[in-house]
Amino acid sequence: MQATRKTQAERASRSLTVLVPCWNEEESLPRLFERLDGLRRNETRPIRYSFLFVDDGSKDSSQSLIRAYAATRPYAHYMFLSRNFGKEQAMFAGIEHVNTDGLVIIDADLQDPPELIGQMADLWMQGYEDVYARRRSRQGEKWFKKASSHAYYALLQKIASVEVQQDTGDFRLLDRKCVQALQQLRESERNAKALFSWIGFRKIEFLYDRDVRAAGKTKWGFAKLCRLALDGITSFTTAPLRIATWLGVGVSLASAAYAVAIAVKRLTTGIDVPGYASTMVVMLLLGGIQLLSLGIMGEYIARIFNQTKGRPNYLIEEDDIGTSQSSLPHRVQGAQRISHDAQTQ
């Protein structure tokens, strides 16, 4: 009879996986473990938590710390990738191996407070399927990063074919519907923010104040951020290709008008139009536009090339998710997807 009541209680609750992509986070992980344990211990809602750590080829002691943490907690699991594939791929490696009622994605640096997950879960239980955390303030970030981020999202909002959530990261709670939709996507070049927007579903904004990094240094330098921004633009829209086309049309029309003006002046005045300097400027301008257009086309062609190679998006070197109580033998993107139901509290 007691077992029956336990089963009924489990069915009345919801299982929620907290997915943590990691890369060289040995300084932050001990504090993260403590706060995640506190989240689970202090939870009063009918939620069964499990934690999944995806290590993206760390060179420090992150894997040892995660392995030791999971060894003493049946609700904690890990997946170690064979090398550094990038945060987006590490994140989707976790997404493709989750089959719980909901999923929370959170960084290991503790800039996104784990204690807010319960409040996000309240909105989830009200029926929202994508509770995305929007940054009300960003402590510890320089003005240039804030300004460039704002400009980037403003640009995306103008050119994207889907609605873009402003000033958001990967910190969000996704319902099983959203997770299953993401598991169906087959892109090799993935941009999580673009795909979160593309899948749709019932979304709601959750405002919060972002903390400073708990320890260590950020892994996102200027070059990486530029690459991520470019990936986001090419993932969201083909507008750059259209802009290049219309730019070419505009320059062609301007060149034709200028040629007509020169011919008219020569015929009406009999004076040649001097302009070695202006000719060079026009040639350099046209050359720059051509190279820019080729670069834009090259970005899209590179995405096609990477897609056609057919390589797996990541390789798993070690994991312990097969030790969970139940499994679902289903292959996603060449890797086995395993259900790891959370343990009851």
Image: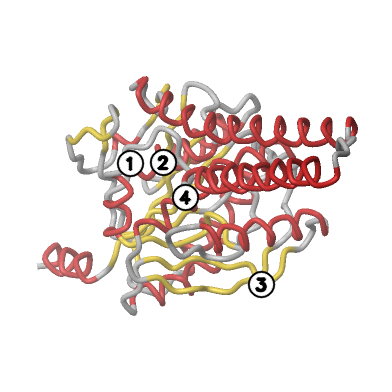
First in sequence: mark 4 vs mark 3: 3
Left or right: 278 with respect to 73? right
Within 10 Å of disc 3 (Cα), the crowding (few <14, some 14-19, many 20+) is: few
Give the numbered dot on residue 96. Answer: 1
Within 10 Å of disc 4 (Cα), the crowding (few <14, some 14-19, many 20+) is: some
Question: Which structural element holds mark 4?
Answer: loop
Q: CA distance from mark 1 to mark 4?
A: 25 Å
> Which corner quadrant holds the C terminus?
bottom left
Give the numbered dot on residue 92. Answer: 2
Q: Which residue is mark 4?
A: 237
Q: Which residue is at 49% across, 33% downward? A: 67
Question: Which structural element holds mark 1?
Answer: loop
Q: CA distance from mark 4 to mark 3?
A: 27 Å
Left or right: 194 with respect to 45? right
Q: Which residue is at 63% across, 67% downward? A: 135
The amino acid type, in three-letter code, at marker 2 is Phe
Question: Which structural element holds mark 3?
Answer: strand
1 or 4: mark nearer the eye:
4
Q: Is residue 56 visible?
A: no
Q: From this view, report whether residue 341 is shown above or below residue 327.
A: below
Q: Is the C-beta separation of discs 4 and 3 under 8 Å?
A: no
Q: Is the C-beta separation of discs 1 and 2 under 8 Å?
A: yes
